């Protein structure tokens, strides 16, 4: 059987997702592939061999005629160029922000006022690139992909394009051994950003804790600004002696990120329910997926989420508010967490590497054979 050739395009931001694609693709025997990325993404790539990466300045430089199908990893701007791709080859486009990229909601004045520091950039996008109107060119793609069932359910309930939308399950589980320890390692994965997570609430809670166990908190992401970085630097001095704090100040390479998450006993995920993308309102868990979902499944970890975040097909812990989070962390023990991991066992078989890889390979082959 002749192999099908795929071009994977990433011109914007989702480098970690691109690395996940590679780890799955290299075990797919019916598929050949090449990665076409912008130079601004290249320095964030660490596990993909350089020989299968082509750096391009624009989508128009990609020789899509040499491939059977195309996967667009991120669709945020330069939409006219993607239309040419969609017109030439069967195309699969991942949706990360449903209100912006599929439901076509308008911008919110509240977001304009709260993100004044990006006013010039966003105005350029809307006025010069006309992204408000041109984003509708995504409808030219043959298939859409969403990264969680909760987003898929949202599309089914609200969009007439549900028939061409499917779940792209890329998170296969690599469960490790639960290691008993005197210190509980708690990792908050992803950027330390008040736009995405309730970081201010979390820092306030940590400074009030008097936990019965020793807790080591790692903020595994780049701080969104100098103010947040300064807060992280001073946090250790404000905390109980049973608490240790580790933080970073810049982008973390994928391998180091994965190693740190693998050592965690618990992933702390204080995801905000409301956020925005390009001034358009988005809701985490329904119109925008949090990368923390993938971090939990990929690493076989129990997460600690707010009740407002939609329940995953996974075993997690949940808190109601800041006071409830404080109570949970104060009373956390290694014995309790060990019992929580026993409850995780029934979910693991759904996310084996072979199961995830085979389903994704069949999705890609169906796309390539669709025209």
Image (spheres, grey):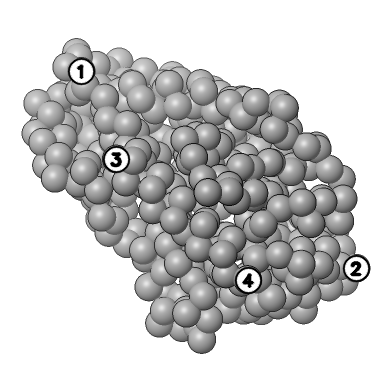
Using the image as rendered, state which of residue 60 and residue 194 is in the foreground. 60
Q: Earlier in the sequence, mark 2 or mark 4?
A: 2
Q: Nearer the viewer, mark 3 or mark 2?
A: 3
Q: Nearer the viewer, mark 4 or mark 3?
A: 4
**Residue at 53% over, 49% down:** 1
Distance from Cα at disc 2 to Cα at disc 4? 34 Å
Distance from Cα at disc 4 to Cα at disc 3? 31 Å
SS of the residue at dot 4? loop
SS of the residue at dot 1? loop
Residue position for label 1: 179
Q: Earlier in the sequence, mark 1 or mark 3?
A: 1
Residue position for label 2: 128
Q: Which mark is residue 371?
A: 4
Tell me if 19 is positioned left or right of 184 in this view. Answer: right
Residue 346 sits in quarter: top left
Residue 232, placed above or below residue 282: above
Distance from Cα at disc 1 to Cα at disc 4? 50 Å
Using the image as rendered, state which of residue 329 and residue 27 is in the foreground. 27
């Amino acid at each position: 059987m002749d192999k099908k050739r795929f071009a994977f395009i990433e011109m914007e931001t989702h480098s970690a997702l691109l690395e996940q694609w590679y780890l799955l693709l290299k075990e797919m025997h019916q598929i050949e592939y090449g990665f076409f990325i912008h130079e601004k993404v290249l320095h964030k790539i660490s596990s993909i061999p350089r020989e299968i990466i082509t750096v391009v300045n624009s989508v128009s430089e990609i020789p899509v005629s040499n491939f059977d199908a195309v996967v667009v990893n991120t669709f945020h701007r330069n939409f006219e160029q993607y239309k040419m791709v969609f017109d030439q080859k069967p195309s699969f486009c991942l949706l990360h922000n449903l209100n912006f990229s599929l439901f076509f909601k308008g911008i919110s004045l509240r977001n304009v006022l709260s993100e004044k520091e990006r006013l010039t950039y966003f105005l350029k996008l809307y006025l010069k690139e006309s992204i408000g109107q041109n984003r509708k060119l995504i409808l030219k793609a043959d298939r859409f992909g969403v990264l969680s069932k909760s987003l898929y359910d949202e599309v089914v309930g609200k969009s007439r394009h549900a028939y061409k939308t499917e779940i792209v399950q890329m998170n296969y589980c690599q469960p490790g051994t639960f290691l008993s320890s005197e210190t509980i390692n708690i990792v908050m994965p992803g950027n330390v950003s008040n736009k995405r997570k309730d970081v201010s609430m979390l820092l306030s809670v940590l400074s009030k804790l008097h936990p019965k166990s020793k807790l080591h908190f790692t903020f595994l992401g780049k701080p969104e600004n100098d103010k947040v970085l300064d807060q992280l630097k001073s946090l250790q001095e404000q905390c109980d002696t049973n608490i240790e704090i580790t933080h970073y100040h810049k982008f973390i390479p994928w391998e180091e990120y994965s190693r740190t998450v693998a050592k965690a006993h618990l992933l702390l995920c204080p995801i905000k329910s409301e956020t925005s993308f390009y001034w358009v309102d988005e809701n985490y868990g329904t119109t925008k997926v949090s990368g923390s979902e993938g971090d939990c499944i990929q690493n076989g970890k129990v997460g600690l989420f707010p009740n407002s975040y939609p329940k995953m097909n996974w075993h997690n812990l949940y808190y109601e508010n800041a006071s409830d989070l404080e109570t949970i962390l104060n009373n956390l023990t290694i014995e309790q967490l060990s019992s929580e991991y026993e409850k995780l066992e029934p979910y693991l078989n759904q996310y084996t590497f072979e199961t995830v890889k085979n389903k994704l390979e069949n999705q890609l082959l169906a796309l390539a054979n669709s025209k």
